[in-house]
Amino acid sequence: MNSIEIKDVSFQYQSNTPVLQDINLTIKKGEWVTILGHNGSGKSTLSKLIIGLLKAKTGQILVNGIELNPETVQDIRQKVGIVFQNPDNQFVGVTVRDDIAFGLENLQVPREDMVERIEKYAKKVNMSDFLNKEPHALSGGQKQRVAIAGILAMNTDIIIFDEATSMLDPKGRNMVLDTMKQLRSEGKTIITITHTMKEALLSDRIVVLKQGRILKVGNSKDILKDKETLEKSNLEMLLPLRILYDLEQTNYSNERIKNLLWELSLSV
């Protein structure tokens, strides 16, 4: 089953310059897909189209087989959650508990069920001990994990991480990446919007955007070894992968060294 189908989607703001052009993409249920591109490539705009914050000029978006339109957008937002770049912009509650409860209150979830969900999903993201804390007292990584808990509590099947680690220190980034991996293992559909190669390597597939168009789609390892595509998209290949690429051009066959280079690329 497909979680998301994007068919011939184009978008532009008030200017006549297209931001996205002729986007066609299918994301399967339980898949982790990275939308990779330089600043201004249109990747964040695509995420906002998927959750209905923006309306496509042309084309069609389906979520779990339901077409996104003004009549279905509220239902679809219960299936798709998004974690934005700046965690401070996402908090609306006085405490962590209040913040996780916010979306549930909008859905008019019964109080008993609400309390159960708050406890369950705070525990899932290792934030049970912080439920009575004020959000400003948390680290960046902890704030993002609270945002994820709020999304999970609404029983969303699909989670979009829109540059969600770009403002975090290495510890906070690793916290969020570990949570992404856990969610992926549980069958959630993950979409990562990023220009960070390390995050892209963790996903099943990569979609490379350039100037609002899809430049290439493929599995993560193939894309991140594709020097020509990365150069065209103004993205820099990780150093270990550049070494691996050069070795493969010489028909180097030591698999142990190749595997070590892949492991090194994940620790960059």
Image (cartoon, helix red, strand yellow):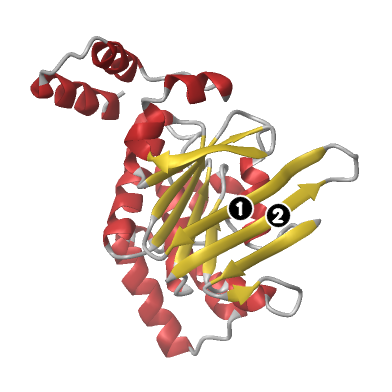
Q: Which of 202 and 231 lies nearest the eye of the viewer?
A: 231
Q: In the image, 146: left or right of 105?
A: left
Q: Amino acid at mark 2?
A: Val
At horizontal 36% and vertical 63% (from top left) the residue drawn is 30
Nearer-N-terminus badge (2/1): 2
Name the spot of residue 103 as percent of width and height, x first.
56, 72
Up-down relation of residue 206 to residue 147 (above or below): above
Residue, disc 2:
9
Q: Are the residues flagged by discs 2 and 1 in contact, CB closer than 8 Å?
A: yes
Callout 1: 10 Å neighbours few (<14), some, many (20+)?
A: some
Residue shown at 28% from the left, 30% from the top:
266
* x and y percentages locating residue 18 in the rendered image: 80, 40
Q: Is residue 46 left or right of residue 12?
A: left
* Label 2 element class: strand
The percent position of residue 31, horizontal first and vertical second, equals: 38, 57
> Does 172 appear above or below 115?
above
According to the image, label 1 marks what residue? Answer: 24
The quarter in which the N terminus is drawn is: bottom left
Question: Which residue is painted at 77% across and 49% down in the image?
Answer: 11
Mark 2 crowdedness (10 Å alpha carbons): few <14, some 14-19, many ≥20: many
Question: Where residue 244 sits: x, y (%)?
Answer: 26, 17
Q: Is residue 15 visible?
A: yes
Disc number for residue 87: none
Horizontally, residue 184 falls left or right of residue 237, namely left
Image height check: is 42 above or below 82?
Answer: above
Of the 4 image quadrants, the one containing the C terminus is top left
In the shown orientation, is residue 264 left or right of residue 152? left
Q: Nearer the viewer, residue 44 or 59?
A: 59
Tag 1: residue type?
A: Asn
